[in-house]
Image (spheres, helix red, strand yellow):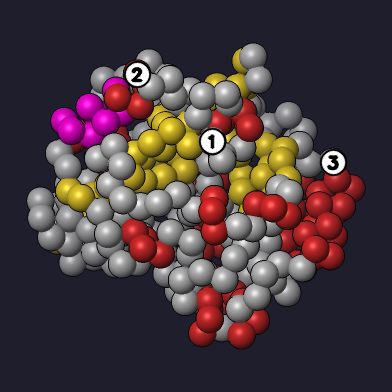
Amino acid sequence: MICSLCPRLCRAERTETAGRGHCRMPELPVVARAALHMWEEPPISGTRGSGTVFFSGCSLDCVFCQNDQISHRDFGKGVTVERLREICQALIAQGAHNINFVNPTHYAHVVARLLEEPLPVPVVWNSGGYDRVETLRALEGKVDIYLPDLKYLTPALAERYSGAADYPAAAVAAIREMVRQTGPYRMEDGLLKRGTVIRHLVLPGRLAEAKGVMDFVSEEFPPGTVLFSLMSQYLPQGRAGEFPQLDRRLRGSEARAAQAYMEALGLEGFTQEGSAADAGYIPPFDLTGV
């Protein structure tokens, strides 16, 4: 394939076994872990867990990525689409409330093909937000829950920390498309069945950016439309040590101020306890379930 799935528009060749694009991934999926996951937002994890499938490679270069081992060092195992379906079916048999594709942007073609035959549980698209509207439109009617990041609204920060100055524009356009597809979120028996949950990870020293993101969500989407997840789990992972301003944990005062701002805006959604900033919550990438 000649790939133009993500906003980088590499148009690079991807064969079954090799990829020359920014994500470095071949055409066929590379997976690092597939298991029930209890640490997503409560209506996604539920009581039995979200059936997470972690794809390797990434179209972003986030210097603080807690999944650096698979996103940037490309650990994982190549599988066929047929094997990927078997993996999803095994997770459903284990009781997964949903199938949660983590970092799927560069494998949108695989997800679309897989979902030509619908799964019996909701499908979650769990991305960094750096998605193309045109690519998302090919998934319309196949994805039930969109779970994108909105990392930054400032191009300079996006370039410095994720190598993508166009991230804010791309992510805003993508999220608008996601919400158009899902409509207002819908819950049943405490579980999210359809809708869009927008995540933001508060970075050290970047409280103003977090407030800007929350302002945007509050102004853009009427109450009852989306859910917002304010994440205070930041740990200096990946290459964060190369950036002094990122080489520390989030202060309690920063997390509290962000949460207070979210409450003042009346955003519906979720916050995290300080205990979430623990490497123990990062799943082991050891080919479990692959």
Amino acid type, mark 2? Ala
Q: Can residue 103 be seen in this view?
A: no
Amino acid type, mark 3? Gly
Residue, far right? 264
Q: Please tell me whether the stretch drawn in magenta is mainly helix, strand or loop.
A: helix
Name the mark on residue 38.
Answer: 1
Residue drawn at x 25%, y 54% is 76
Q: In the structure shown, which secondary structural element does the residue marked by tag 2 occupy?
A: helix
Amino acid type, mark 1? Met
Pick the front one: 77 or 122: 77
Query: Residue beneath label 2, please?
Result: 93
Q: Is residue 94 visible?
A: yes
- Quarter assignment of residue 196: top right
Pick the front one: 5 or 17: 17
Task: Name which of mark 3 and mark 1 comes first in the sequence.
Answer: 1
Image depth: mark 3 or mark 1 in front: 1
Task: Name which of mark 3 and mark 2 comes first in the sequence.
Answer: 2
Residue drawn at x 65%, y 81% is 245
